[in-house]
């Protein structure tokens, strides 16, 4: 998995594109300094199908990609 793009909205919401062997997933998440990342929505870019099951299976990797992407954007 790789982070394709990431954008921070209003300081607490993230839109991220994550590429996988199966395609690209568009992820919407809420971030907070006091709670873990909360994935609100995830869909396959190519089909629009729900991708929350895939995200759940790879949650630690997805969370890490989002965290690293936000840290890099902050530099």
Image (cartoon, helix red, strand yellow):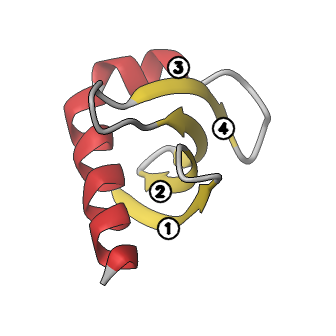
Compared across the picture, whether 45 is left or right of 30 comes to right
Rendered position, 22 above or below 59: below
Instruction: Please tell me which residue is depicted at 57% across the width and 40% down the height of the picture.
Output: 27
Query: Would you say the residues marked 1 and 2 are in contact, meaning their CB atoms lie under 8 Å apart?
Result: yes
Residue under numbered circle 3: 52
Between marks 2 and 3 in the image, the one whose residue lies nearer the viewer: 3
Nearest the eye: 13 or 69: 13
Q: Please tell me which residue is depicted at 28% across the width and 53% down the height of the picture.
A: 67
Figure quadrant of the C terminus = bottom left
Mark on residue 4? 1
Picture quarter with the N terminus: bottom left
* Within-10-Å neighbours for mark 2: few <14, some 14–19, many 20+: some
User: Tag 4, which secondary structure?
Assistant: strand
Across and down, in percent, residue 55 comes to: 41, 27
> Which mark lies nearer to you, 1 or 2?
1
Direction bottom: furthest residue: 75
For mark 2, what is the residue? 19
Q: Are marks 1 and 4 in contact (CB under 8 Å)?
A: no
Q: Residue at x 38, y 36 (%)?
A: 32
Q: How far is the residue under mark 1 from the one under mark 2?
A: 6 Å
Q: Nearer the viewer, mark 1 or mark 4?
A: 1
* Label 1 to label 4: alpha-carbon separation: 13 Å
Give percent across and percent down for residue 11. 54, 53
Residue at horizontal 30 percent and vertical 76 percent from the top = 72
Mark 1 or 4, nearer chain start: 1
Q: Residues within 10 Å of mark 1 (few under 14, many from 20)?
A: some
Q: Secondary structure at mark 1?
A: strand
Q: Earlier in the sequence, mark 2 or mark 3?
A: 2
- Residue under label 4, please give it: 44
């Amino acid at each position: 998995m790789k982070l394709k793009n990431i954008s921070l909205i209003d300081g607490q919401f993230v839109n991220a594109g994550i590429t996988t062997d199966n395609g690209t997933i568009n992820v919407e998440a809420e971030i907070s300094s006091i709670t873990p990342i909360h994935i609100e929505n995830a869909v396959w870019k190519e089909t629009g199908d729900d991708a929350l099951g895939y995200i759940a299976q790879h949650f630690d990797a997805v969370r890490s990609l989002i965290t690293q992407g936000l840290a890099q954007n902050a530099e």
